[in-house]
Image: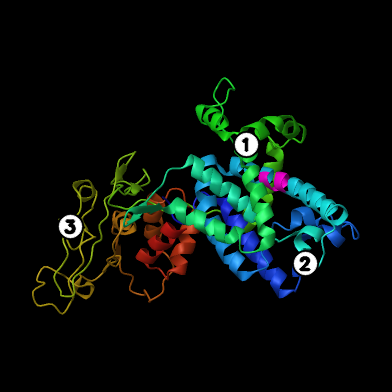
Amino acid sequence: MVAGFAGAPVSKGAIMLVCFSSLLTSTLSWKQYVHLQIVPHLTVYRQYWRIFAHYFCFTDSADLFLGLILIYLCFREQERRLGSTQFFVMLLRIWALHGAILFAILRALVAITNTVLLLDSHAYPVLTHGFATSGPYPITIVVLLHQMQTSPGLWTVQVGPAQFDEKAIQGLLSLLLAFSRSGNVLGSCIAVAITPLCLPWPRGTDGKACSTELRFRRQGGAFARLSASMTSLLSFLLLQRVSRAVVHSLQVAALNLIGNTRKPPRSSRAERRRDPTLSVPAPLPQLSSNFSFNMPRFQIRRPGGAAAQTHANLPDGVQHFLPVTATSGRPPNIAAPDAYDDNARDYVPPAALPDGQLHIEPPPASGIRSIFRNSLPDPVMPRSPSASAVDPPWEQHIAVLQDAFPLQSHESVVQALQESNGSYAQAVERLLSS
């Protein structure tokens, strides 16, 4: 069972729509415009939009709380089981069928109570005025009944001799929602009656009904007869199949506002992590023409002391491609010890180099980029007598960098050296980042 709304954009949109419309209706005091009442709103004022608009919001906080719990528990599982498109078509079918049947029954009740029974309108306002409360509780009840028919229980709790599962809890919540108001009872009964008409029964390859549908029809009784009698009507109203173009247009219009939640990734203990692949350009003189290998996750760290780092922790494939500097006689990825370290006898600081030579070495770093950067040749340039702290890039720098980065133009290499104030290491970093 996946928590949240992963793979259930229709359920997420339904909860967002119900919450937003309920809050907006309560804030703007529009509660008198969202319920369904035959007299006088439909008979006198001709407000027929109430027939299908009263499903989108709750007018009571208790109904809103119970309705959101049921929507969250029922809608997500059914949408993942049926698919978003088929589940959306099922909701449209419930909405259209329930609205039409509810209007017809309320219109008949108003005619019977006012002309035949002559009931007092003040004593029986629900029957004489044809009143029905707002809220998507009929749609929720149909989806709940569908879930009880198609999905097994996930957990069971035993209290003494009695056993309860999640279906019992959901059924109790639906009963509380159905009987919380007198206007909900009629709509809930109609929702139970139209449940067989709204179920998206799966079909076989030959077009015949599956065994689940046949068994439900044999055991359905009155529901089965009602389903058989309404087949022609449903085909006439095109409620059995909604066009894919309509569904796709609605998804495109609403998906940017609603969004979709991705499924949570598996744990690293259950699925092996994918190692990054290091691909170094072929024209480097130290590497072969086609060089690619899987690099494990590691990081080179320099300890707090003055001890130099070694490349013993690196894989053999990486050690083979580490060049040796011409001045210090050690691989460039090995961090040089500090100048003030007494134990560093084999380390020659830059100031102690012979006159006329300048050792330029990139600073120690870790990761794949440092391996690629340290794979570049380590130039030893003659020191110019008139060299200053910021000299223009020399031709030796440009030649080495162009050999290492054949895809970069001459102007890009010169610009990288100028922006790094002649620093070879910073120029390499800029070219790697470009």
Q: Residue at x 75, y 53 (%)?
A: 52
State if disc 3 and disc 1 touch (CB < 8 Å). Answer: no
Q: Residue at x 51, y 45 (%)?
A: 147
> In the drawing, what numbered circle is on residue 123?
2
Relative depth, front residue between 257 and 41 = 41
Q: Residues within 10 Å of mark 2 (few under 14, many from 20)?
A: few
* Residue 5 in sight from this viewpoint: no
> What residue sits right under mark 1 in the picture?
223
Relative depth, front residue between 324 and 192 = 192
Q: Does 96 lie within the magenta span?
A: yes
Q: Residue furthest bottom?
A: 340
State the separation of the CA atoms marked 1 and 3.
Answer: 78 Å
Q: Which residues are magenta?
A: 94-98
Q: Earlier in the sequence, mark 3 or mark 2?
A: 2
Q: Residue furthest top?
A: 206
Q: Nearer the viewer, mark 2 or mark 1?
A: 2
* Residue 269 in sight from this viewpoint: yes
On the image, the x and y values in percent for residue 146 come to: 55, 43
- Overall secondary structure of the magenta section: helix
> What residue sits right under mark 3 in the picture?
311
Q: Amino acid at mark 3?
A: His
Q: Nearer the viewer, mark 3 or mark 2?
A: 2
